[in-house]
């Protein structure tokens, strides 16, 4: 089974083009996940896109991956980035190393609707790309944690490259996995 994490910006493409993830990345060959940070980002989507996203999460059995940790006083209950016992998982050494290295990229944002810090979601995804595939709709030349992760061997698949190929989503992602192993 290949695990694929979705960047929140992929929902924009899926929604605009009415893409069925069950057809593009079928079970049981693919397991699809979002991060806790991605789950928080969904809360700020416009209603119609949020409904599409939540429906897809249920229909496609998309799971939320959350690290184990203790609540932070800076965040309310609904905005905690970590989960407690029997809910969160321990981060791998590779994820911890990458996240620690990228902490300087996480900073305050001046966008009032945002519930995450700037680059917080991208760092969480980029860290996971050290072990699993991350699908993003960012441009491959955009500077940031996802580009850095790919340069360091992370399994980051840029949607623009996938769409520019003649392969199916499943075949393209499989080739990305084996190319980076």
Image (tube, rainbow, N blue to C red):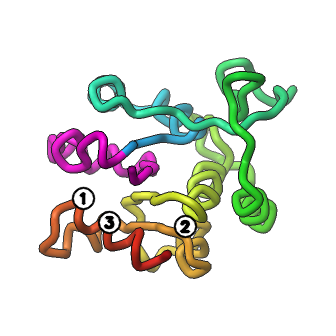
How many numbered tags mark residues here?
3
- Residue at the location (42% across, 49% down)? 6
Q: CA distance from mark 1 to mark 3?
A: 6 Å
Q: Is residue 86 above or below residue 154?
A: above
Quadrant assignment, res 52:
top left
- Residue at the location (28% across, 69% down)? 160
Residue linked to disc 2? 146
Q: Are marks 1 and 2 in contact (CB under 8 Å)?
A: no
Q: Position of residue 55 (x, y in %)?
A: 29, 24
Tell me the tag on residue 40.
Answer: none
Q: Which residues are magenta?
A: 1-30
Question: Could you say whether the residue bearing mark 2 is in a helix, strand or loop?
Answer: helix
Q: Is residue 77 above or below residue 139?
A: above
Q: CA distance from mark 1 to mark 2?
A: 21 Å
Q: Are marks 1 and 3 in contact (CB under 8 Å)?
A: yes
Tell me the tag on residue 174.
Answer: 3
Disc 2 crowd, CA 10 A, few/some/many (<14, 14-19, 20+): many
Q: CA distance from mark 3 to mark 2?
A: 19 Å
Question: Could you say whether the residue bearing mark 1 is in a helix, strand or loop?
Answer: helix
Tell me the tag on residue 170.
Answer: 1
Please identify, in this view, whether the residue under mark 3 or under mark 2 is nearer the observer. Answer: 3
- Residue at the location (56% across, 77% down)? 153
Is residue 8 covered in magenta? yes
Question: Could you say whether the residue bearing mark 3 is in a helix, strand or loop?
Answer: helix
């Amino acid at each position: 089974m290949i695990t694929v994490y979705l960047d929140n910006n992929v929902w924009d493409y899926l929604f605009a083009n009415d893409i069925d993830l069950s057809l593009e990345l079928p079970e049981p060959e693919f397991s699809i996940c979002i991060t806790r940070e991605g789950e928080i980002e969904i809360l700020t989507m416009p209603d119609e896109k949020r409904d599409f996203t939540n429906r897809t999460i249920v229909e496609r059995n998309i799971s939320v991956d959350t690290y184990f940790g203790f609540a932070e006083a800076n965040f309310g209950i609904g905005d905690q980035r970590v989960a407690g016992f029997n809910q969160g998982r321990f981060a791998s050494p590779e994820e911890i190393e990458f996240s620690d290295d990228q902490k300087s990229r996480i900073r305050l944002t001046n966008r009032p609707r945002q519930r995450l810090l700037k680059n917080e979601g991208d760092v969480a995804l980029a860290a996971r790309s050290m072990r699993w595939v991350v699908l993003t709709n960012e441009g491959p030349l955009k500077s940031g944690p996802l580009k850095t992760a790919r340069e360091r061997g992370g399994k980051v698949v840029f949607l623009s490259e996938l769409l520019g190929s003649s392969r199916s989503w499943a075949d393209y992602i499989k080739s990305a996995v084996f190319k980076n192993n």
